[in-house]
Amino acid sequence: KYLDIGIDGVDFSSEKPDLLEFLDLTKQAGDDRARATVSGGLISKAAPAPSGSAGRRGRREGLFLSHKLSNAEQSVNGADVRRAVKAQIAALGLGTSYLDMVSIHSPLTDKNRRLESYAALLELRDFGFVKSVGVCNYGLGALNEIKQAG
């Protein structure tokens, strides 16, 4: 439903619960040319929806969907991480089968959770549920853990 108002870059992080409420209010305003700025990087761009025969497929190709895996979503059980990401994909309600990027939001967990979560994200990438994997707020120590783990 948000594609219809031209929003093409949204971070659906569970740490930003006000996002969906904001988007619903924007949609209710009925402005197809809605442009919005929300602090915290919630919306990277809002532009007019494509016209003509672009259809949903054309709109999805122009949409960048990302998710930041919260500390609560990190786990030593890779299946839990995979379920959490797939739940985010389903929660979008866009009929999409993948996210463009998923990153681990914070290194403030233990080493085993960080490494298993990262490995689970790589598996999701390999199976096409995620196009790219990344990390946020990592220092050299946590980055070296990933590098050393291979």
Image (spheres, rainbow, N blue to C red):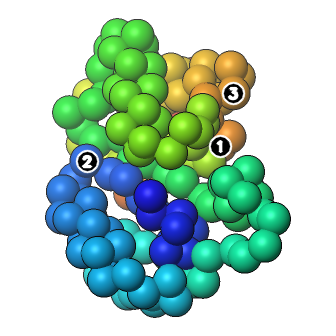
Q: Position of residue 119 (x, y in %)?
A: 53, 21
Looking at marks 1 and 2 on the same chain, the residue that comes earlier in the sequence is marked by: 2
Q: What is the CA distance from the residue labelled 1 to the residue labelled 2?
A: 19 Å
State the residue at coordinates (58%, 39%): 96
Kind of residue at disc 2: Ser
Task: Tell us which disc is closer to us: 3 or 1.
Answer: 3
Q: Can you tell which quarter of the image residue 122 is in?
A: top right
Q: Can you tell which quarter of the image residue 104 is in?
A: top left
Above or below residue 108? Residue 97 is above
Q: Which of the pair 143/37 is nearer the observer?
A: 37
Q: With 106 as the anchor, is 49 left or right in this view? A: right
Above or below residue 52? Residue 128 is above
Q: Position of residue 12 (x, y in %)?
A: 37, 53
- Residue of label 1: 132
The mark found on residue 128 in the picture is: 3
Q: Position of residue 111 (x, y in %)?
A: 34, 26
Kind of residue at disc 3: Gly
Q: With 25 as the anchor, is 64 left or right in this view? A: right
Density class for disc 3 (Cα within 10 Å; few <14, some 14-19, many ≥20) is: some
Q: Which of the pair 29/106 is nearer the observer?
A: 29
State the residue at coordinates (42%, 32%): 90
Density class for disc 1 (Cα within 10 Å; few <14, some 14-19, many ≥20) is: some
Asked if the residues shown at circle 3 and circle 1 are in contact, with their CB atoms under 8 angstroms apart, the answer is no
The mark found on residue 118 in the picture is: none
Q: What is the CA distance from the residue labelled 3 to the residue labelled 1?
A: 10 Å
The mark found on residue 14 in the picture is: 2
Q: Which of the pair 112/24 is nearer the observer?
A: 24
Q: Residue furthest right?
A: 53
State the residue at coordinates (55%, 75%): 6
Kind of residue at disc 1: Ser
Q: Can you tell which quarter of the image residue 91 is in?
A: top left
Asked if the residues shown at circle 1 and circle 2 are in contact, with their CB atoms under 8 angstroms apart, the answer is no
